[in-house]
Amino acid sequence: MSREPRVRGFQFAGVHCGIKKGGALDLALLLSDRPASVAAVYTRSTVPSAPVLVSKRRSRRGIGRGVVVNSGISNVAMGARGVADAEQMSANAAAAVGVRPGEMLVASTGVIGKPLPMECIEAGIAEAARDLDPLGLPRAAEAIRTTDTYAKLSHRRVRVGEHFVNVAGIAKGSGMIEPRMATMLAFVFTDAAIAPKPLREIWKAVADETFNRVSVDGETSTSDTAVILANGAAGGRPLASARGEAGQRLQAGLVAVCTELAMDLARDGEGATKLVTIEVSGAKSPAQAERAGRRIANSMLVKTALFGRDPNWGRILQTVGAAEVRLDLDRTEVDLCGVPVFRNGASTGEAARVRAGSRMASPEISIRIHLAAGRASARFWTCDLTYDYVRINAEYTT
Amino acid sequence: MSREPRVRGFQFAGVHCGIKKGGALDLALLLSDRPASVAAVYTRSTVPSAPVLVSKRRSRRGIGRGVVVNSGISNVAMGARGVADAEQMSANAAAAVGVRPGEMLVASTGVIGKPLPMECIEAGIAEAARDLDPLGLPRAAEAIRTTDTYAKLSHRRVRVGEHFVNVAGIAKGSGMIEPRMATMLAFVFTDAAIAPKPLREIWKAVADETFNRVSVDGETSTSDTAVILANGAAGGRPLASARGEAGQRLQAGLVAVCTELAMDLARDGEGATKLVTIEVSGAKSPAQAERAGRRIANSMLVKTALFGRDPNWGRILQTVGAAEVRLDLDRTEVDLCGVPVFRNGASTGEAARVRAGSRMASPEISIRIHLAAGRASARFWTCDLTYDYVRINAEYTT
């Protein structure tokens, strides 16, 4: 890990444009000084936000220069006006930094059903363009926050072929949307040289095993967006394939950065007191492994048990069974925080239960389940379900 | 609705056999005085309880005499011993009332991973056989309770062809399993005469639109069981088809009884303060309507908003969108407690919001969503997500 989250050829800014109260940063500008390969994954919601509609069209080209993001208002369910505002916002940003509007992606996160204050945003963009800084990524991470309790940033230096390349990324809170304003946004930057097509292939694989494996409450926002820009500033011939050793090393670097961000999203889930890592193995197929992991991650029963430090293997087995996942119960294994609590079709006894329960006081909990039905595995991250989750989401009065 | 839940040719008992503390009823015996047509639906969990395995095999024959049920211990994850115990329990019950073991179904609900106390159960069965009473259904309803705050019973008198027939049913708490012991069990009795095959067809349809449309927390227990016995004591030739007018009338009577039971299950969900009825219309297909309804019913965000009396149409739309359900946002309609809160792609304004919010103080809440994508519809029942849900499930210490 390098000390400074600097990626050659990129500059970043985070400013206060006036959407959030109290001067909090609410507008970020993320820019490459040269055309970069772009790949992105978006929410599959049938009610996508206007910025998602606009960015999706643009990222399909595979080349871009940057992203402009606001927090506080999400630009969802605003009809034709929403799309016009998203286009206007990206056109302002493009003009402010001297690139074409089609080269600028756009994202918004915050409350649904309110129009963007376009004058504030325009002024904020002008300020952000003046503030652009190679060391500005922490401020940008701050500016995309909504209910996140801390800004999320990760970076790595990895060797790809003959070059060392930098990878840095920022993300914001997973959990929900209006009115608590959490949407998953992630923006990752690398100075590696890679063509758009292999970048897209790698990015999809990276998102699938990192951001798509986090769940706070099983909800998908209308605005979820994860973008990568690779500008080649590290030098070298652009990678033409995702398959070779260089592509695999770049992918590993991206997985490391995105895993760190994904774990932060789960750790900082609304009301969470625990980061929970779920490891499923012995599944009949990758789809079954993923289903089992996702089901455990979203189970209200499991999540309340974790909050209560209850080493409840019964709830884990029950939710996997309910997901119609194949398992051989007599050979199924469940470990909690490294303690075997279920073997040979039964509890391993009271002593193990007590030991697991006391380890569950930790802010990081692991659940390992081996299904004894095959060889596929999957990893998921989630958090516990707490009084604070209910308070945050019930006591908000609109 | 008749005053007494009496169904000709049936007798019922509920006794305390010693599994629950403090003398609470924990064993029920449900018996027809003659061979009855039987149909049943069971959990689809891949970790079914031993009683489910045994009953499934027996109900396939289509003819039976009764059911024996215990509450307090669920007989799950006990290996070969579990199946032997379930067989023993039903053999005891069959012997006590003078029928063949294969004519007796069995169900258990309660904690996972503990063996059934077979001696207590055997003594309880003997006592229950002595207590059998045509008016014993309320005691049986009491004896199948676990975390339910009240016993659930419904009955109707309906005209089927030339005969009036009685339909009565009992059910117990939906929500979860070990260690809070809620599993959905329902037992319904009618003196209508109907052959096993049409009864099975009708029962599946009834369960699909009643018990399968309730969700407290999205979990399926390892022991879920819904059984109907039709003994023909009302007289007349047995119905040979589910399709004719008589079959449809019987089905309507069963739907009425099972809807009442299903609504009680949602109303009495763990920690619930509100019964929520969700009506989805304008869906592209029945599967899409069901998916939208189920997703709303299971959304932690929607359920916390309902607890907080927050007329939050944004969360409803977001969760439907996340389920990848087709909708035409500009023509989508959302009503909360009868108040239109979303029309023409936008909020209907602050006044409607306030009106809906004040109506949401009621213990019964309705959510209506029209998707404007087709003509299919579905109805679901759920409850809100409260501090008490978290307390009940987190503070239980094992």
Image (cartoon, coloured by chain):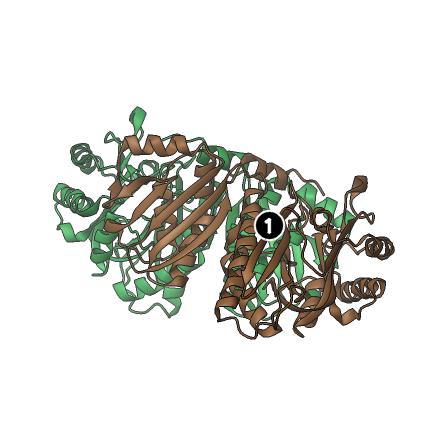
Chain colours: A green, B brown
Residue B352 appears at what percent x and percent y? 30, 34
Residue B5 makes an appearance in the image: yes
Q: Quadrant of residue B189?
A: bottom right
Residue B134 appears at what percent x and percent y? 74, 54
Picture layout, residue A149 above or below residue B82: above
Tell me the kind of residue under disc 1: Ser
Q: Mark 1, residues whose alpha carbon is within 10 Å: few (<14), some, or many (≥20)?
A: many
Q: Which residue is mark 1?
A: B174
Residue sitting at the far top: A22
**Most foreground residue, B294 or B358:** B358
Residue B111 makes an appearance in the image: no
Q: For numbered disc 1, what is the local secondary structure?
A: loop
Chain of the residue that carries numbered disc 1 in the rendered image: B
Q: Which quarter of the image is occupied by the C terminus of chain A? A: top left
**Most foreground residue, A56 or A220:** A220
Residue sitting at the far front: B162
A140 vs A274, left or right, is left
